[in-house]
Image (tube, rainbow, N blue to C red):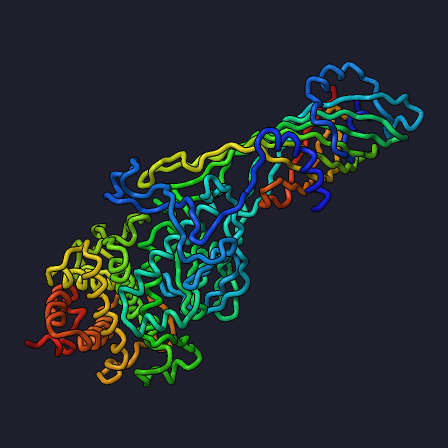
Amino acid sequence: MKHARSRARSCLALAAASTWTLALARTAGAQQDAPGSAASGAAATPGISYALGVSLGFLQQRALGSSTHTAFIPSLLGLAYVPIAPRVFLRPGLRLGYTGLNQADASYGARIEERGLQGSAELGICYDAWLVPALAVGTGLEYRSLDFVGRGIVADSDAIDRQEWLGLAFVQAGVGVPLFRGALVVEPYTRLQYTASDDRSLWQLGLDLSFAL
Amino acid sequence: MRLLQALALCGAPLVLYTGCVSQGELLGPPFEVVVLDRVPGPADVAQSEDSGFALRQRELTTVEDFDQLSAAAFRIRQGGTLTAEIVNGDTVSSGSFEGGEAPDLRYVVQGATAVPRDYATLLMFSAAYQFEQVSSGLRAATDERIRAALDAQGPLDVMFGPALVARVEGVRAALRMRTNAFFFPAGWQFGLALSSPIERAPLAADRRVIAHELGHAVFQLAFYGGETTACDEDAASEHAGDAWFAGRLEAELALGGLNEGFADWISFAVTGGTDPLESIAVPADAALDENVAARVLTEDTFRWSNIVDGDADQQSDRRCAGKYCIGTLFARSLVATYRGAGHELEDERARHEFSGELVEALEGAEAAMRRGNLPLPSQEVASCKNRDQVSSSADAPIVGAFLQAFLQGLPGDTRGRLCIELVDRFEAGFPVEFREECQP
């Protein structure tokens, strides 16, 4: 059952309410009845199931001129699987990510460090088979801080430091690979993200690792 | 993308509630912006707001279109591809440039001032401000003809982060410039490559670097008459017997070095700074016997005998390598002559006036060289090959021919003082047969 449940984890999503929480996913994890799977077929009793995991995202951003910067964005991930048809599941999810672990190229003496906390909700749809293709859309918010750092011959300053809230939205496509009888699903994905008032975002590639609850 | 924008707005109520990022409307010209700028005091004791570089609120007075960061004298652009065929130090002598886009500026308006929201925008604001400052200073430090030529060229394209490609014998390869700023005379373009950790401060914010690169533009106009020619390696056999084959001077290491030195002079004349590379942490060269401050114009740390790539057994106490050393000897001689005339380093008006004399002399130098006796090119130069190290036999006659021609254009008192400084520093690099102008 776990196998079937896990294989159903990549999905197509539509913007979900931003009030969902990871806690909800955890508490609901007691509902272990899984949706249908390739093995069990349409005869299985459908039910909502849950998964928690981490996501490793690599967001390509435009930098100066023709160059790009790849921002590493690790995230916590919570997913629910809601059967809507044989082998087809809606997959609402929540992500909480951090940006700023790596910074774009800059001079030694002066740089602007950007750090942010991203919370997003998504709704996806996925098809449960040996591989689990999924498509999702999502929306969220980023709380971002900008910090000018001066060193050496450049004086440090807070003249341009600021914090800002940014809305974001994305579409994401992935293919889940169930492992260990479905206890773990590894889902490489690609995502096109738009961040309000920040048009530097290009494609994001990443890897979702989720564990069945 | 429209769907994504719409979805992003799903988060907008919260964003609006908590403080939306609105770029706002900037009034001008003039436009108030926050830039990184030099502030008074020795940079090495920075870490305070009073010296080195610091964020400052400044006014862009000549920028007409803020979104394009364009003015009559310059235009900020992003990206594009520079294909270089011949690179001499920080001057791309031959190549082409394609593409480039309007600057993508991200800022907020706070109290009528544009405050950058990312590093790229900070650099572009800073560069625009520095170009405004340098452009007016550059005109003051030249003469009427060069001022007119600069104006006639139209706006200089300042390219941020272009992709650099080298094309050698038909093969294209990605190129990483040794220096992070360069001048491309053919396209009348100035390039600023990506920032790197060796920059103690961003080059885009350093008017000394910008003035140096624009010094190449002055050399291009004054010495080459605005037109340079690429050396044709297919005609090597014809070149060997022709002292004035097209592209010969552009291919000479010595002329490249003197060009660098003149650019350092212009940097000093425009900004008053005597260390054009202060914002770059130049790594030590293990091949030298002694690493010295190779570009500080008020120092006197080496002579010709310390820079030539002579026989290893004969060479000792090598302190500088490459054509830039020729340039430093030239620039130091110019600064020493300026000071010897009783001028202060800080006297901007005196710097500009003195520089005007030098530019005038440079304008007549190529014609004077043609009247003289330029030796036949070395086999390397005839074949359009680059050489890295200074050669006493190959470079000294070129240096001598140039200096002789340059001196001819100077007023008598300046010529006499400069002769003494040049002979002192260049030693055998200024051969006796080219010292006619130094005779009392």
Residue B44 quadrant: top left
| Residue B241, image quadrant | bottom left
Picture layout, residue B46 above or below residue B266: above
Position of B55 with respect to A81 (left or right) is left
Residue in the foreground of this view, choosing between B185 and B286: B185
Residue B41: image location, x then y, percent = 24, 43
**Which residue is pictured at 21% across the width and 52% down the height?**
B289
Q: How many marks on residues?
A: 0
Please give the name of the residue rendered at 73% of the width and 43% of the height, measured from the top-left corner. B3
Rendered location of residue A104, percent (x, y): 49, 42
Q: Would you place residue B303 above or below residue A166 in this image?
A: below
B169 is higher (above) or lower (below) than B14: below
User: Could you tell me which residue is drawn at 26 percent across and 64 percent down?
Assistant: B141
The residue depicted at 80 percent of the width and 34 percent of the height is: A125
Q: Is residue B308 visible?
A: no
Q: Pinpoint residue B276: horizontal percent, then vertical percent.
A: 28, 54
* Residue with the most extreme left position: B440
The quadrant in which the C terminus of chain A is found is top right
Choose top left, top right, bottom left or bottom right for residue A130: top right
Side of B194 where B336 appears, left or right: left
Q: Is residue B122 visible?
A: yes
- Farthest residue, direction right: A43
Position of A202 with respect to A187 (left or right) is left
Q: Position of residue B397 (x, y in %)?
A: 22, 75
Give the position of the N terminus of chain A as an image quadrant: top right
| Front-lying residue, B166 or B160 | B160
